[in-house]
């Protein structure tokens, strides 16, 4: 579990948790479900069983929200992931994210499982970045428990953003603060398609940092280390365990896919922060990363606990370029889109390859000259002069959107985009389904919930034919 992090700013209206689990057999539909779209969209996010204003949003107990699409209907189910953290909160009536309860109670903390959900080697896994994956059942969302893949994974850091190589089917992963939490130690590993750990190595980053995402290409692995620093000493002194220290600068480790961690070369670039990578690729001589770049990270303070600035600039889709022959080991950054936003996704059949299409949640201007956060879905076609945008009404917000190909052999971007909208006027949510290349035309179908799905992090689509156990 992440160390307790001081909360910051007044939360958005949909960030608070809900206090129930439920099943709904058939949601009311507007429009028509696309033919052939059958499977399950599962979203993950923090939903503390015991709310506490001292606890940072990032530490809340994981809750999964599943939309089952089959037989011309949409069914819904939500469940907390049954972690040791959740059991501790239930037993004590206290919020483990607000204080170091696991340590005080002498239990082995298996994290919050609140950030992402993926499938690999027949397992559906709820993920966060400081603990082992936790397996869940796709049909019921029942928790099966932590998995170390037959003893191949040590306990501790595992990314919420592993990358599946579309050619090999391998799952590549990393972890920060490993093996010692909040240290500069990192690990890199590979899971085979059948779930065997075929590679696991450790290395030292230039400094201890929160490293939320990484990138792969056909020839390289890329580890972005940015100055949202980690410090156990600060935490023990009652100061922020994670804090913005721009003097450390941005350091990006580039490792050949065929090499070892000893071959990592560290590059320097603009001081900034990135939570999420849209995609990366290389052409042999150059390496490219498309990232959602902040000038400084939101929600985190300076080392003394003071705000890092009056207001954090929102992230913008930015392309990092590495000339692999540059002896100075310095990369450049170019803003690609002026519409700010977060939560980038692609057609994941193109992970690590040159690509044309990406999607993210955008922020549109409000009447007061500010921004309405999460108020749009944005489709970027890198060959088109301007993005395709769907704007939500004032008061509404969108989750991260997930792309689903129309069929396995469909062209890149030909398919559906699924997102969960929060409707501010009714304080309810709905599943919205778009033609992924025609966002401005609006949803082709939506399925309405009688309650809201709180703001969360990430999700995935699981095709109907797969949950073999």
Image (cartoon, rainbow, N blue to C red):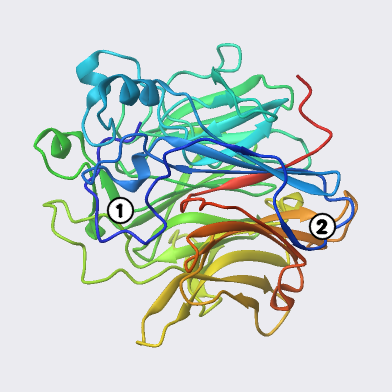
Q: Secondary structure at mark 1?
A: loop
Compared with 112, 314 (above or below) is below
Q: Nearer the viewer, residue 338 or 183?
A: 338
Q: CA distance from mark 2 to mark 1?
A: 45 Å
Q: Quadrant of residue 210?
A: top left
Is 367 on the left-hand or right-hand side of 415?
A: left
Compared with 60, 248 (above or below) is below
x%, y% of residue 25?
71, 40
Q: Residue at x 27, y 35 (%)?
A: 3
Q: Quadrant of residue 286?
A: bottom right
Q: Nearer the viewer, residue 222 or 63?
A: 63
x%, y% of residue 426?
50, 64
Q: Secondary structure at mark 2?
A: loop
Pick the quarter of the image with the N terminus: top left
| Residue tagged 1 | 227
Pick the quarter of the image with the C terminus: top right
| Residue tagged 2 | 33
Sequence-wise first label, 2 or 1: 2
- State whether residue 210 appears in this view: yes
User: How would you rate the neighbour count of disc 2 (Cα within 10 Å): few for under 14, some for 14-19, many for 20 or more?
Assistant: many
Is 35 on the left-hand or right-hand side of 337?
A: right
Looking at the rendered image, the disc whose residue lies closer to the viewer, 2 or 1, is: 2
Is 114 on the left-hand or right-hand side of 216?
A: left
x%, y% of residue 91?
31, 19
Q: Quadrant of residue 89?
A: top left
x%, y% of residue 106?
25, 13
- State whether residue 282 appears in this view: no
Q: Nearer the viewer, residue 456 or 227?
A: 456
Q: Residue at x 76, y 50 (%)?
A: 349
- In the drawing, what numbered circle is on residue 333? none
Q: Residue at x 84, y 58 (%)?
A: 34
């Amino acid at each position: 579990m992440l160390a307790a992090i001081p909360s910051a700013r007044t939360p958005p209206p949909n960030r608070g948790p809900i206090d129930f689990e439920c099943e709904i057999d058939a949601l009311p539909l507007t429009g028509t479900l696309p033919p052939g779209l059958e499977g399950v969209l599962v979203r993950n996010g923090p939903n503390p069983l015991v709310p506490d204003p001292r606890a940072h949003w990032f530490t809340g107990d994981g809750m999964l929200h599943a939309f089952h699409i089959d037989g011309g209907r949409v069914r819904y189910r939500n469940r907390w992931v049954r972690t040791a953290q959740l059991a501790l909160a239930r037993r004590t009536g206290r919020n483990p994210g607000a204080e170091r309860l696991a340590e005080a109670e002498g239990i082995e903390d298996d994290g919050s499982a609140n950030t992402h959900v993926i499938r690999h080697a027949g397992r559906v896994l709820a993920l966060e970045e400081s603990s082992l994956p936790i397996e869940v059942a796709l049909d019921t969302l029942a928790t099966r428990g932590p998995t170390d893949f037959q003893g191949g994974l040590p306990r501790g850091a595992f990314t919420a953003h592993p990358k599946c190589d579309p050619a090999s089917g391998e799952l590549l992963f990393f972890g920060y603060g490993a093996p010692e939490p909040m240290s500069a130690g990192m690990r890199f590993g590979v899971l085979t398609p059948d779930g065997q750990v075929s590679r696991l190595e450790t290395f030292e980053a230039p400094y201890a940092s929160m490293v939320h995402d990484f990138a792969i290409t056909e020839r390289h692995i890329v580890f972005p280390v940015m100055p949202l620093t980690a410090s156990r000493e600060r935490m023990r002194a009652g100061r922020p365990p994670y804090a913005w220290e721009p003097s450390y600068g941005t350091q990006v480790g580039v490792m050949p896919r065929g090499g070892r961690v000893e071959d990592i070369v560290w590059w320097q670039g603009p001081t900034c922060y990135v939570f999420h990578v849209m995609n990366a690729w290389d052409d042999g001589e150059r390496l490219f990363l498309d990232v959602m770049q902040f000038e400084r990270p939101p929600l985190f303070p300076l080392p003394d606990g003071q705000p890092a600035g009056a207001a954090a600039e929102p992230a913008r889709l930015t392309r990092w370029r590495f000339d692999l022959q540059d002896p100075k080991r310095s990369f450049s950054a170019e803003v690609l889109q002026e519409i700010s936003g977060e939560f980038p996704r692609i057609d994941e059949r193109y992970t690590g390859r040159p690509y044309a299409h990406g999607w993210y949640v955008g922020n549109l201007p409000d009447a007061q000259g500010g921004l309405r956060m999460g108020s749009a879905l944005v489709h970027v076609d890198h060959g088109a002069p301007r993005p395709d945008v769907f704007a939500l009404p004032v008061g509404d917000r969108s989750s991260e959107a997930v792309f689903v190909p129309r069929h396995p052999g469909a062209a890149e971007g030909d398919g559906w985009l699924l997102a969960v909208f929060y409707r501010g006027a009714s304080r309810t949510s709905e599943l919205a389904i778009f033609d992924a290349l025609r966002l401005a035309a609006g949803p082709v179908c939506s399925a309405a919930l009688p309650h809201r799905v709180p703001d969360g992090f990430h999700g995935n689509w699981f095709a109907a034919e797969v949950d073999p156990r």
